Amino acid sequence: VYPEHMPAAIRRAPRSRIDQLVVHVRHRSTVPDVDLRDALWQAKQDERLYHRTDTHWKDLGAHVAYAEVLSSLSRDAPALRPRPRTAFEKRHVHQRGLDLAQMMGLTRVLEEDDIALDPRTPPDSRIVEPKTPNGYGIEARLVTEIPGSSKPRAVVFRDSFFSSVIPFLSEHFSRAVYLW
């Protein structure tokens, strides 16, 4: 039996390992958590949030995650408000198959139509470490800064899903350190 304050995604699903982790963190820790499942579930009713040939979020899914994380942080830091989707322009991208296609050796056969979210105004944040980044990908440590900013700082422990969230989130911090 799940407590009433548990998100609907937990109450309706079989008890998975993520369910167990959420229950544990909420009942035995003072660490705040953000469970993205309900927000992603709702958003996916209107648009595809994941790539067809990849296990990760598209920009559309990353924006949902970013908005949920910042909305949660804004409870303690009201200035941290997510930028609405209208602050971004949709750009259609056609590309070769991604990680699932690669695992099957079909990157040249499977293709994907994607939607990128480009900011309508130029981003303020810049990658400052590593010196030659490969984008917002798999660096063990990635640092972004907004020169001359008095915004708060952040340290983010992340996995591969968060790579696509970094460009959105970095705009709200004078310096953000992302650790894999």
Image (cartoon, rainbow, N blue to C red):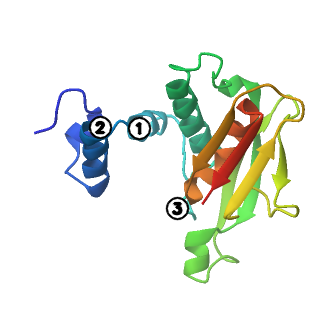
Residue 61 in the image: state x and y as whole percent. Answer: 56, 43
Residue 56 in the image: state x and y as whole percent. Answer: 56, 57
Viewed as shown, does residue 145 lie left or right of 113? right
Residue 123's disc is none
Q: What residue type is labelled 2?
A: Arg
Image-quadrant location for residue 25: top left
- In contact (CB < 8 Å): disc 1 and disc 2: yes
Query: Which residue sits at x=57%, y=63%?
Result: 54
Q: Which amino acid does label 1 sit on?
A: Asp
Marks 1 and 3, how far apart at CA: 23 Å
Residue 26's disc is 2
Looking at the picture, tell me which residue is in the foreground, 45 or 84: 84
Q: Is tag 1's residue or tag 2's residue first in the polypeptide sequence? A: 2
Q: What residue type is labelled 3?
A: Thr
Residue 134 in the image: state x and y as whole percent. Answer: 80, 64
Image-quadrant location for residue 30: top left
**Residue picked out by circle 3:** 55
Residue 51 appears in the picture as rendered: no
- Say above or below: 115 vs 53: above
What kind of element bears circle 2? Answer: helix
Quadrant containing the C terminus in the rendered view: bottom right
Viewed as shown, does residue 81 lie left or right of 26? right
Query: Which residue sits at x=55%, y=36%?
Result: 64
Viewed as shown, does residue 105 lie left or right of 142? left
Looking at the picture, tell me which residue is in the foreground, 5 or 31: 31
Residue 77 in the image: state x and y as whole percent. Answer: 58, 20
Query: Which residue sits at x=45%, y=36%?
Result: 45
Marks 1 and 2, how far apart at CA: 8 Å
- Say above or below: 39 vs 77: below
